[in-house]
């Protein structure tokens, strides 16, 4: 009997241990399964940000290029071959400085030829004047009245039989010769007077050609029309240059000068924003070359005529910039941020953290471990935004964490 009781106690002990082990395993598995199936409301740190104090501005951006306030394209008034170039791009020049010289040999030859033509024309004029004076003197014929009196007297004496018929005819012949000579001289004087007019016109024409040749010779020295910086040099020694007086805007561009101490951004603003832009408005200009630097400027001109391209209408806006150090170069790409409204020392939150409901009211989600899903919704009042950050007028304080959507 004692052995039977011992065996029964051993079986019950074995079953008890087994039950405890199974129960422990099931409990652990249940707890593990429960932990696995429970939702994880933890927030990725990269999705968290903070409310901070700072400055914010609402603005309109005009994108464009840096342009000098004054820019001049230098072209030659004379045609020729470039013989000398005295400046290069990047150099500062003053008004009146010599920029380039054209080959003057042919131009000097033209001047000599024109001077010879002037001398010949003046000589022809002097000859015509002398001929006119001679013919005019002969046309006056001071002896003609005396010869006429001689004829009258001879005729009277012939009637009285005092002289022969031959003597009378001799007096008449002398008078007719003198009268014919006077008529020819008068006619020649009229002709020479016309020749004087022609000679004077030819002399004036030759003088004009000479002045033009001398002007071309002077114009072959190309000088600076302004104080400024050489922005580009567009010819080399030996290049042919055409005259702007002949080809106009198609003439050869020699150099481009500009005053870069005072520049502006020539940009475009969308028609949706142009109504909020006005003259004198402050602007901040950024360029790719100086990413960490902002240049101050003001709106100086707004085009009244929009330009449509790809169904988008934009308006040209000029924003002036002071550039005393010459950091800004012509044709640099630039963004002019025209400030419409600005706030300083206000609460700022990332704009991507703000949610707007159907009623237009704004809210922000903030991390909260005690909330059902680990986050709570906070109603806020939003001020101005700049596309990156938004001003918070109410609802949160500096240092509060927010969840980025």
Image (cartoon, grey):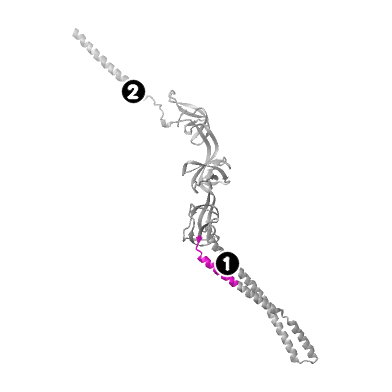
**What residue does disc 1 label?**
210
Query: Measuring 74% from the left and 90% from the top, which residue is drawn there?
Result: 167
Indicate the position of residue 113 as horizontal and vertical percent values: 55, 69
Q: Is residue 393 above or below residue 142?
A: above
Q: Is residue 202 above or below residue 234?
A: below
Label 1, residues with CA under 10 Å away: few <14, some 14-19, many ≥20: many
Instruction: Report the quarter where the C terminus lies.
Output: top left
Instruction: Report the quarter where the N terminus lies.
Output: top left
Mark 1: secondary structure: helix
**What residue does disc 2 label?**
32
Q: Is residue 60 above or below residue 146?
A: above
Label 2, residues with CA under 10 Å away: few <14, some 14-19, many ≥20: few
Could you say which quadrant of the image residue 338 lies in? Answer: top right
Is 115 covered by the magenta stretch? Answer: yes
Q: Is residue 369 left or right of residue 222?
A: left
Q: Is residue 310 left or right of residue 30?
A: right
Q: Earlier in the sequence, mark 1 or mark 2?
A: 2
- Magenta residues, start to end: 101-121
- Asked whether residue 272 is in view, the answer is no
Indicate the position of residue 173 as horizontal and vertical percent values: 72, 87
Indicate the position of residue 40 as horizontal and vertical percent values: 39, 26
Query: Measuring 76% from the left and 86% from the top, which residue is drawn there?
Result: 150
Indicate the position of residue 225 as horizontal and vertical percent values: 55, 55
Looking at the rendered structure, the number of numbered marks drawn on it comes to: 2
Q: Is residue 384 above or below residue 376?
A: below
Of badges 1 and 2, the one in the foreground is 1
CA gap, disc 1 and disc 2: 110 Å
Q: Residue furthest top?
A: 1
């Amino acid at each position: 009997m004692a052995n039977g009781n011992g065996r029964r106690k051993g079986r019950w002990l074995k079953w008890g241990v087994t039950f405890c082990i199974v129960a422990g395993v099931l409990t652990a598995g249940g707890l593990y399964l429960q932990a696995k199936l429970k939702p994880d409301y933890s927030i990725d740190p990269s999705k968290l940000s903070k409310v901070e104090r700072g400055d914010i501005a609402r603005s309109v951006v005009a994108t464009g290029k840096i342009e000098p306030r004054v820019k001049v394209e230098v072209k030659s008034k004379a045609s020729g071959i470039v013989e000398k170039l005295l400046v290069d791009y990047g150099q500062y020049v003053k008004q009146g400085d010599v920029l380039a010289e054209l080959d003057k040999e042919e131009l000097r030859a033209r001047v000599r030829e024109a001077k010879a033509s002037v001398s010949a024309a003046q000589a022809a004029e002097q000859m015509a004047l002398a001929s006119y004076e001679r013919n005019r003197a002969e046309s006056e014929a001071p002896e003609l009245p005396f010869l006429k009196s001689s004829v009258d007297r001879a005729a009277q004496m012939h009637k009285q039989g005092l002289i022969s018929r031959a003597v009378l005819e001799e007096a008449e012949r002398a008078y007719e010769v003198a009268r014919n000579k006077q008529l020819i001289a008068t006619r020649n004087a009229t002709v020479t007077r016309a020749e004087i007019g022609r000679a004077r016109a030819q002399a004036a024409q030759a003088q004009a050609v000479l002045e033009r040749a001398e002007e071309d010779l002077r114009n072959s020295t190309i000088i600076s029309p302004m104080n400024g910086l050489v922005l580009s040099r567009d010819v080399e020694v030996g290049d042919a240059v055409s005259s702007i007086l002949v080809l106009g805007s198609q003439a050869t561009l020699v150099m481009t000068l500009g005053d870069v101490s005072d520049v502006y951004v020539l940009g475009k603003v969308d028609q949706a924003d142009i109504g909020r832009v006005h003259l004198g408005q402050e602007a901040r200009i950024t360029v790719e070359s100086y990413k960490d630097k902002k240049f101050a400027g003001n709106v100086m001109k707004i085009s009244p005529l929009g330009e449509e391209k790809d169904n988008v209408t934009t308006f040209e806006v000029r924003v002036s910039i002071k550039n005393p150090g010459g950091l800004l170069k012509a044709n640099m790409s630039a963004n002019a941020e025209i400030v419409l409204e600005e706030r300083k020392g206000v609460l700022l939150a990332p704009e991507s953290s703000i949610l707007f409901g159907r009623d237009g009211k704004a809210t922000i989600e903030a991390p909260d471990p005690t909330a059902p899903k680990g986050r709570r919704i906070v109603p806020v009042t939003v001020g101005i935004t700049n596309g990156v950050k938004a001003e918070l007028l109410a609802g949160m304080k500096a240092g509060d964490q927010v969840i980025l959507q």
